[in-house]
Amino acid sequence: MAQLPWLHQPLEAFCSLLKTKRIGHAYLVAMDMGYGGEQLTLALAKSSLCTAVGYAGSCGFCKSCQLVEANNHPDLYRVEADGAQIKVDQIRSLCQKLTTTPQQGGRRVAFILNSERLNQASANALLKTLEEPGKDTILFLQANSPSRLLSTISSRCQRLHLEIPAKSVVRQWLHQELQISEDVTWCLPVVGGPLAVIEAVESGREQVLVSYRKAWLQSLSSGLLCDSLINVNEKQVSDALKVLYLVVHRILVKKQEVDPLTRVALANFAGKIMQVETRLSVMPTVNSLALFEGLTIEYRQLMSQ
């Protein structure tokens, strides 16, 4: 937890509830994994099982903490998507396990990662357990996109007070972690969070995103698609579109002299880009060349009006 300073406060607040025995039975952890949502959820679960929990989290030394560290705690259950969805059989199995007596004599704790991937059937299977979880049972539902979580589920969970760290905080943290001088926070909206930025820098993905940014600026200016955008494969289309959105948004911010009607058209164009990106997951195939050329032409047309 030390490397993610913005997670200290919510963990301390939760541990305070634990120590004063004012704990609830279900919590929604509305934080993207890229910002540490999984780490926070695991820390909350570990603290819930710790026999010597402090205000800063689990002790790390008791038998329960040692079992969690070894991924071998019999009363801790982890659920995550099987493919694109969390399936009903996974939830039914979890609910059955939560009816058993805790083997360590303490709490039974479960956490569901990317809980917005619960489908209608799996969500319905979870409802009864959320309403009547049983004695000494705590559930944590982590969500990258909490707005996509079914209201019947989110309404039955308490929410921890979570705040996305300011960009300046993230920038400073990334500088310390990566030991680099350049600002890489520009790609946060593309990759999903500071942890994902580190992965992108180390894998070379961030440099590919930089090349997309340069290529879009040139393509929008000339009306001709650059080579680096012509050769984008299906797995890279989403990144290229997200970068295009950032480029258009930046143009909106910088070109204050553009007339109001054109600014509205630009804003609508940016919205269209993200709508297309959102629909990619349900498209059987994507002709990226035709898509990118069409967006380039549309931009040129609206800017020439």
Image (cartoon, grey):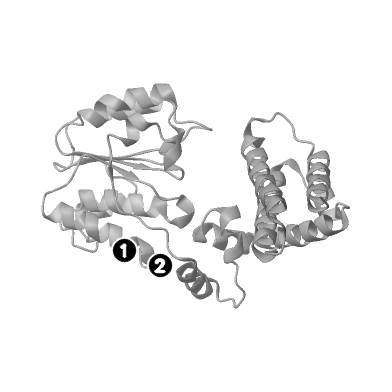
- Write down the residue under mark 1: 8
In this rendering, the answer to whether 55 lies above or below 262 is below
| Mark 1 neighbour class, 10 Å CA radius: few under 14, some 14 to 19, many 20 or more | some
Secondary structure type for disc 1: helix
Secondary structure type for disc 2: loop
Q: Which mark is residue 3?
A: 2
| Mark 2 neighbour class, 10 Å CA radius: few under 14, some 14 to 19, many 20 or more | few
The picture places residue 233, in percent across and down from the top left corner, at 76, 44
Q: Tell me which amino acid carries mark 2.
A: Gln
What residue is shown at x 40% (from left), y 64% (from top)? 4
Q: Tell me which amino acid carries mark 1.
A: His
The picture places residue 145, in percent across and down from the top left corner, at 46, 43
- Is 297 positioned to the left or the right of 35 in the image? right
The picture places residue 60, in percent across and down from the top left corner, at 25, 60
- Residue 152, image quadrant: top left
What residue is shown at x 15% (from left), y 39% (from top)? 136
- Is 301 positioned to the left or the right of 2 in the image? right
In this view, the residue in front, 118 or 253, is 253
- Residue 212, image quadrant: bottom right
What residue is shown at x 54% (from left), y 53% (from top)? 192
